[in-house]
Amino acid sequence: MSITNAIKRALPKNSFVRSVLVLGGGTAGSQAILILSAPLLTRLYSTEAFGILAVFMAFLSTISVISSLRYELAIPIAEDEEEAVHVVVLAFLVALVISALTLLIVALFRNPIANSVNVPALANYLWLLPLSLLLLSTYQIFNYWAIRVEAFRAIARTKLTQSVSSMAIQIGGTALGPLALILGNVIGQGAGMTTLGTLAIKNRWPTLQSIRFKDLRRVANQHRKFPLISTWSSLLYTIGTQLPPILFTVFFSPAAAGIYALANRVLSLPMMLMGQAIGNVFFSKAADARRDGSLGFLVAQVHENLAKIAMPPTFLLAAVGPDLFAWTFGSEWREAGVFVRILAPMLYFQFIFSPISMIFSILGKQEKGFFLHGTMISTRGLSLTIGAYFGGLRLAVILFSLGSVLSYIVFLGQAFKVSGVCQIEMAKQTLHNFLYCALAFLPTFACFFLDLSSWIKISSFMITFFILIPFCYFPLSLKEQAKS
């Protein structure tokens, strides 16, 4: 038996769980590459360099939300292939226009933009923003086609390609300073685009050649809720998540943004991308689930699996974050571990909410999502501002985390309500996972009451964490397999 066949036989039979493990495995592998390279990068680049990267990526992430006016989200739910191809072309044309407008703005205003966020050096790198935007937008469009045809293995391979490309450029281009960090992300965004593009275009030339402007206009009107509502809802959500590095540079310094960026890269990004993998599979299954009346069950299943995945690393990093970061990345990065400890509850709920938030688009309730995201950005911005004004950096992070947790709890309650899921049952699931992990980690908490070295503390928590993995991750779900 070949290794490939052995792996296929080992995977769960349930199609949802199987797809999550395939896509999640590729995502986890790609993030493992980035995390393993992080200790080297923190010794090659300064906190200021990471701060410049963080602000650049904040601009890119924010603009990318509107780059295709969210038409790419209509690709998986299009009624037939002809309609889906028209949406692909429409989304790509919109991305070209937005990228060109971005180029014009950067050419005219890059210095004022850089000065407005208290990072004048950023002006030297903003010329990469339009190119990054076009590469990222094109990848996302092809990615949603791959989701439509359930080509999750192809998506997983491109995630690995992106990480390897990014890491190679960032490590090899040290002499270029922050430029190498940014170039690594730019080129990494586009890596794998050819693979998914071929998948979307292959054998579809007749349809592509028959596309007419009136058909594009019809499709644009048919899915108008995505640009009119989803775009702005997603923009508000992204601004909320990208607000911290920008405000840290404005209120404090690029170094403060760099510290936050490392904490985010090591903890938030892997968790979010794993959640995105589950969300992509959820998005591809939800349309059918809605039609056959099983959407509520699907949402409950996704929430249960997300909670199982997120709770153990949340406990681990909240407990030993500062010691772990100082040991792994160098003593000057210990503050990033403090950030991780403070942000751990927020990141847990962010991980849970990210995939489930798609329910508003699936059910055509984009207006509700827009209102909720507007509330979140206001809460986060106000929390950071109050903290910076009255107490400095740590208080700003504490208030930001608390405000975000409260917002996510409200959002999840609304998502469960519109999908017909019992909110009390979901709260019980969360409490059950919390108590399970608290009991499992209880013996290792004794290390904090004894005069033991940081290495012993970290080791005890890591051992417990890896013992928990088979119970939290691999049964993702025996219940679902039994029901299938």
Image (spheres, grey):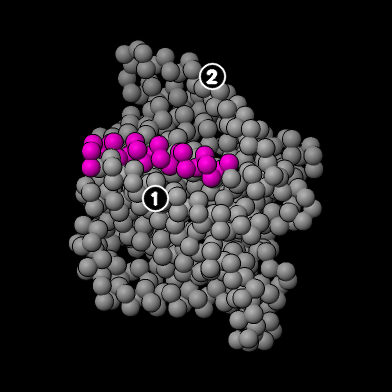
Whole-percent x, y for residue 89 in the image: 58, 77
Mark 1 is surrounded, within 10 Å at the Cα level, by few (under 14), some (14 to 19) or many (20 or more) other residues, namely few
Question: Where are the magenta residues, as a range?
Answer: 389-413
Residue behind mark 1: 378
> Residue 429: in sight, yes or no?
no
| Left or right: 145 as drawn, with respect to 321 | right
Mark 2 is surrounded, within 10 Å at the Cα level, by few (under 14), some (14 to 19) or many (20 or more) other residues, namely few
Look at the numbered discs 2 and 1 and tell me whether their residues touch, using CB distance below 8 Å: no
| Left or right: 245 as drawn, with respect to 91 | left
From what the image shows, is residue 250 above or below residue 446? below
Distance from the alpha carbon under mark 2 to that under mark 1:
36 Å
Secondary structure under the numbered disc 1 in the rendered image: helix
Amino acid type of the residue that numbered disc 2 sits on in the rendered structure: Leu
- Quadrant of residue 326 in the image? top left
- Quadrant of residue 264 in the image? top left
Q: Nearer the viewer, residue 400 or 199?
A: 400
Whole-percent x, y for residue 409 in the image: 52, 39
Amino acid type of the residue that numbered disc 1 sits on in the rendered structure: Ser
Of label 2 and label 1, which has the lower sequence position? 1
Q: Which mark is residue 337?
A: none
Q: Nearer the viewer, residue 8 or 189?
A: 189
Q: Quadrant of the C terminus?
A: top right
Instruction: Report the mark closest to the observer, 2 or 1.
Output: 1
From what the image shows, is residue 28 above or below residue 138? above
Q: Residue at x 30, y 54 (%)?
A: 246
Secondary structure under the numbered disc 2 in the rendered image: helix
Does the magenta stretch mainly form a helix, a strand or a loop?
A: helix
411 magenta-colored: yes
Q: Residue at x 74, y 45 (%)?
A: 14
Q: Residue at x 40, y 27 (%)?
A: 319
Residue behind mark 2: 439
Q: Residue furthest top?
A: 450
